Amino acid sequence: MHFTPVDNLRGVLQRGCLVADSVVQSLSIGIRECGDVSIKQRRRSMPVSVSPYGYVGDYVPFYFAPRSPMIYKISRGSVPTYTQGQELLIYFYSSLRVVDQADLPWVGSDGNCATSITEHTNDRAELEQWVDWDLMTERYWSDTQEDGDRMRRRMAELLVYNSFPLSSVLGIVVQNQAVAETVRQQVGSTLQVAVKPGWYY
């Protein structure tokens, strides 16, 4: 699941793909940013340890579950550079099966790729063992006294190198009907649009 402000949808449709942060930077693509600026900067210099290498910012990031810690921060108004709230965020979703069928180069992680202890893999079997699938099903993921690594693991990622074609997107999820109508007016019948308030806080 990759989320972005609905304001960015038109540009995504025009390009025909989601693009990595480094592409946004190099081409000076105008977007509405919803990420934490300091974290984005850190990801541009965090090396990826397996092929196709590069930096985390060279990849389009996907989470394995909704209601990520980043969405939580946005819902609480804790991202000063983005004040529109979670209601105007939309999810693009896909699957690793689709990614493999499209032969897209990817890297998976066992947690938040902005942290130095996170490990990378490009082996599907290893990734499936690394991801904490039970934690992905939980609504709340705060660190506890018994487990101080829950938040990092909850932010495990699938990173797709450089760009992610819309032909590999299975659909879009939004929080409410008003945003759904806005999205449907733009995508027409090319992508399925679903309203799932449970994917938000």
Image (cartoon, rainbow, N blue to C red):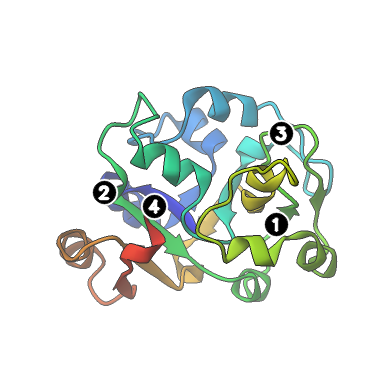
Q: Which residue is mark 3?
A: 115
Pick the front one: 16 or 77:
77
Check disc 4: other Cα within 10 Å, few if <14, some if 14-19, many if 20+: few
Please tell me in which quadrant of the rendered image residue 57 appears: top right
Disc 3 on helix, strand or loop?
loop
- Labels 3, 4: front one: 3
| Image point (73%, 54%), residue name | 107
Pointer 4: what residue? 15
Q: Secondary structure at mark 1?
A: strand
Of the pair 102 and 175, the residue shown nearer to us:
175
| Front of the two marks 1 and 3 | 3
Given the image, on which type of amino acid does mark 3 rest? Thr
* Residue under the image location 68 percent in, 68 percent down: 103
Q: Position of residue 74 (x, y in %)?
A: 38, 38
Q: CA distance from mark 2 to mark 3?
A: 28 Å
The residue where tag 2 is placed is 88
Taking 114 as reference, is 135 above or below it?
Answer: below
Q: Which residue is mark 1?
A: 106
Q: Residue at coordinates 26% horizontally, 66% vertically from top-left?
A: 187
Q: Is residue 161 left or right of residue 21?
A: right
Q: Mark 2: which secondary structure?
A: helix
Query: Looking at the picture, which amino acid does disc 2 mark?
Result: Leu
Mark 1: amino acid: Trp
Identify the residue shown where x is 54% and y is 43%. Answer: 20
Percent position of residue 122, x then y: 80, 58
Instruction: Give the mark, 3 or 4, whose residue is nearer the N terminus.
Output: 4
* Quarter-of-image position of residue 76: top left
